[in-house]
Amino acid sequence: MAKNLKNAVIPPMDYLEHERTYQNFVKLFKWGTISLVVLVILLAQVLL
């Protein structure tokens, strides 16, 4: 497989798709963090 890299055709980068993927990642990370903080607060109230 390494021998074929010299002849490989690399397609141009799809910047629109890249931006969309990055925005979705940031959105997922933000809401995941918020959810975990809320969960920790709720657990603290229940257990303390």
Image (cartoon, rainbow, N blue to C red):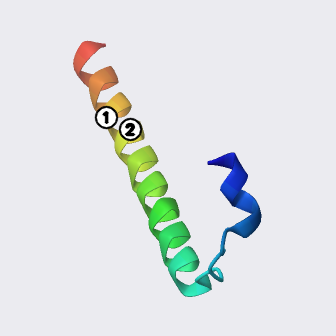
Left or right of 16 on screen, residue 13? right
**Mark 1 burial class by Cα count in 10 Å: few <14, some 14-19, many 20+:** few
In which quadrant of the rendered image does the C terminus lie?
top left
* Front-lying residue, 9 or 15: 9
Left or right of 24 on screen, residue 48? left
Q: Amino acid at mark 1?
A: Leu
Extreme residue toward the top, this view: 48
In the figure, 10 relative to 28: above or below? below
Q: Amino acid at mark 2?
A: Leu
Q: Residue at x 40, y 55 (%)?
A: 31
User: CB under 8 Å between callouts 1 and 2?
Assistant: yes
* Front-lying residue, 8 or 24: 8
Residue holding disc 2: 36
Q: Residue at x 71, y 51 (%)?
A: 3
* Front-lying residue, 11 or 48: 11
Secondary structure state at the residue bearing disc 1: helix
> How far across and down, in percent of the image, does residue 23 sit?
51, 71
Residue holding disc 1: 39
